[in-house]
Image (cartoon, rainbow, N blue to C red):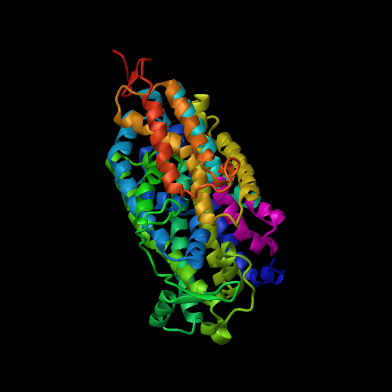
Amino acid sequence: MLTMTTLAAFGVIDWTILAAYMAAMMGIGFILARRTSDETDFFLGSRQMPAWAVGMSVLASSLSAATFIGAPQESFDGNLTYLILNLGGILGALIVAAWFVPAFYHAGTLTIYGYLGQRIGPRAATAASVTFLVGRLMASGARLFMAGIAFSFILFGKTDFTAVAGAVVALSIVGTAYTALGGIRAVIWTDVVQLLVVIGAALLCIALLLRAIPLSIGEILHELRHFTVPDAGGAVSEVNKLKVVDWRFDLSLPYTVWGALAVTTLNVAAYGCDHDLAQRLLTTRSAWRGSASIIAAILAGIPIISLFMIIGLLLAIFYQRPDLMGDAFPHDVLIHSEKVYPQYLTNHLPVGLSGLAMAGLLAVAMGSYDSAVNAMAASWLADVRGDHSDRHSRGAVVMMGALLMVFGLLMLLLYDPQAQSLLHFALSVMTFAYTGLLGVFLTALLLPGRGSERSVITAMVVGALFVLATQPYVMKLVMDKPPSIAMPWTMLAGTVLSLLICAAGRSGNGYHRGHEHE
């Protein structure tokens, strides 16, 4: 546990910068509050948002605190093989752009689940929306709790349950406030600002770390390629921390070339079946603009994620190699790798720059939080309640913000740092909802005439139960040594199972391709 000297390191100037940033986000919400006229405007920006801004917003939301904190942890503990998952991201974006986005625009509904209502029936839309709400609460709750870990350093100087919980509550209040004011317009335009802050903060930290490490860039690369750290028994092993491509076919390894191909299903689900990200794609003037924004977001995300992986590599030298750091070796003791980047930000940045870097963390936290509560509010009103008026839009945002705060606290209780990294935890949480949703959407898009309201509901339930059954803590209940199966393969198998179950039903209720029987 850090002492209160950590809190003191974050000075008045830093707090001023952070407060100014938060005030700016609230100001955008106030300004845009006067421009929202109805529910379509509040949740879809009247489909008039520029594609470049939508792409930046999608990217800002997809990064989240899981990237800000989790990506440095991955490279700090291991290497760069996490980057290979971007292969699945590109393939997933192309699939969504080609098939999902045009279908959603043709449907013309407030949410993507309205498409299922047209194609299969209203109960299908409701079932998909409920599945999305539960899954998004879990996944965004995990992201919110990760951001709370870092902010608890600043607010309370420690990371016990009470401190992290307090940070989670504070972040929830700020994000809900400006989202309820300005709707999707506030989400997109604040995300644009927040993405620029995130990139600036990452570049700043890389520059400062390069300055602090007394080695040339060539020497740093050599040491990372032949990185040595003694284990608990004193034995020294050498690893290549610059490794990106892993060709091993091993179902227990999440970050391999084969795992990247399997994780394509996760990306198709994230951008095509999760209204959190898909909602932004419906705010542009046409389907092709929405498709272009998702492809641009994926491609632009690769170098940005790489920046955070580079930070983790440099922190590995900074905190683990006193032989290389010499007199510049830090005196603060690293508690756990999940806190390595927040600890560096709090303890080692000059006055003023620490505030800017923490504004970057706030940016990624809010970038994923605001879009989630807005999308959940739209789905709740349109698909669950069937309320298509704008009277309850802001109230629904506040309700979803409160629920998301509760789930953030729940994820704080569920996360086990000894079992998995923060990034892997965030990704695995999403699969509970994604397996069923993706199986259902693929049935609706690719198999005309297949899928019924009953088979949709069954597929959703079975998909979530399949993911649950493959979790290590569940498999241990029935076997002493359960097999280790990485998340991409669980997602792929669960999606195929859900698709087969959904396709077993036949649409006989008068719904097909968005039109009733004529």
Q: Residue at x 68, y 53 (%)?
A: 166
Res. 44 visible in picture: no
Left or right of residue 495: residue 95:
left
Tell me, yes or no, if residue 190 can be seen here: yes
Check the image and report above or below for 418 versus 466. below
Task: Say whether residue 8 is left or right of residue 379.
Answer: right
Q: Principal SS element in the magenta part?
A: helix
Left or right: residue 391 versus residue 509 is right
Closest to the observer, 91 or 78: 78
Q: Look at the image and give the residue range highlighted in magenta.
A: 140-168
156 magenta-colored: yes
Residue ranking furthest to the top: 518
Residue at horizontal 49 percent and vertical 24 percent from the top = 386
Horizontal and vertical percent position of residue 395 = 58, 35
Q: Tell me, yes or no, whether the highlighted magenta stretch contains residue 261.
A: no
Look at 42% across and 46% down and name the residue there: 489
**x, y (%) of residue 131?**
50, 33
**Residue at (39% x, 53% y) in the render:** 56
Can you name the residue that lies furthest to the front here? 480
Which x, y percent locates residue 434?
45, 39
Rendered-image quadrant of the N terminus: bottom right
Write down the quadrant of residue 239 in the picture: bottom left
